[in-house]
């Protein structure tokens, strides 16, 4: 399996130490998106897009906690952010990353091409995935990067 350092050597990532205020803001974004995904009356596409944005931000938090960011000069920075998840936290999150990559494609179609790309089950699954990922990121950061974990943040 590759490593984040190998990705840096491939010029997909750049080294950039993160600070608590940045991670705090990223958690605020993820939490806002999770909240917005649960607003009554929201379209299925809207729910799905908010859940996707939350999941993407949580992947970014993991990568930033490791002291990297995606090289924005490279194409596909969202996909690299998502694909970095198992490298940043644990290979056991590969299935989660794969699900978010598929969601990224659906999101793009729903945003730019047409409605009806996702159904309620897709949206609910992505919300559940993002919520579970949030808990995983918090557990992992508590064990490995506690200095970057915002005060008062909980898994719930």
Image (cartoon, grey):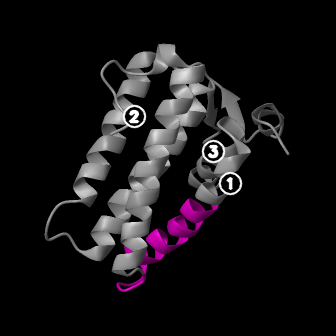
Residue 7 placement (x, y as % from top left): 78, 39
| Label 2 CA crowd tier, 10 Å (few <14, some 14–19, many 20+) | some
The mark that comes first in sequence, 3 or 2, is 2
Secondary element at tag 2:
helix
Secondary element at tag 1:
helix
Could one spot residue 84 in this view of the protein? Answer: no
Q: Are marks 2 and 1 in contact (CB under 8 Å)?
A: no
Instruction: Give the Cα separation between the discs numbered 2 and 1.
Output: 22 Å
| Label 1 CA crowd tier, 10 Å (few <14, some 14–19, many 20+) | some
Q: Residue at x 60, y 51 (%)?
A: 82
Secondary element at tag 3:
helix
Q: Which residues are magenta?
A: 98-117
139 in relation to 104, above or below: above
Q: Residue at x 60, y 21 (%)?
A: 144
Instruction: Give the Cα separation between the discs numbered 3 and 2.
Output: 15 Å
Horizontal relation, residue 35 to residue 18: left or right: left
Residue where numbered disc 2 is placed = 26
Residue where numbered disc 3 is placed = 85
Is the magenta region chiefly helix, strand or loop? helix
Residue where numbered disc 1 is placed = 94
Indicate the quadrant where residue 62 lies.
Answer: top right
Residue 42 placement (x, y as % from top left): 19, 69
Q: Nearer the viewer, mark 3 or mark 1?
A: 1
> Residue farthest to the top?
147
Residue 139 is tagged as none
Q: Nearer the viewer, mark 2 or mark 1?
A: 1
The mark that comes first in sequence, 3 or 1, is 3
Q: Are marks 3 and 2 in contact (CB under 8 Å)?
A: no
20 in relation to 7, above or below: above
Instruction: Give the Cα separation between the discs numbered 3 and 1.
Output: 7 Å
């Amino acid at each position: 399996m590759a490593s984040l350092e190998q990705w840096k050597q491939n010029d997909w990532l750049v080294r950039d130490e993160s600070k608590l205020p940045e991670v705090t803001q990223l958690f605020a974004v993820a939490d806002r998106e999770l909240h917005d995904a649960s607003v009554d009356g929201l379209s299925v596409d809207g729910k799905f897009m908010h859940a996707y944005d939350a999941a993407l931000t949580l992947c970014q938090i993991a990568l930033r906690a490791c002291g990297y960011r995606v090289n924005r000069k490279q194409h596909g920075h969202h996909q690299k952010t998502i694909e970095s998840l198992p490298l940043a936290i644990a290979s056991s999150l590969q299935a989660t990353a794969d699900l978010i990559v598929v969601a990224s494609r659906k999101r793009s179609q729903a945003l730019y091409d047409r409605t009806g790309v996702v159904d309620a089950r897709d949206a609910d699954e992505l919300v559940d995935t993002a919520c579970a990922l949030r808990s995983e990121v918090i557990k992992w950061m508590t064990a490995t990067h506690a200095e970057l974990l915002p005060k008062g943040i909980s898994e719930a």
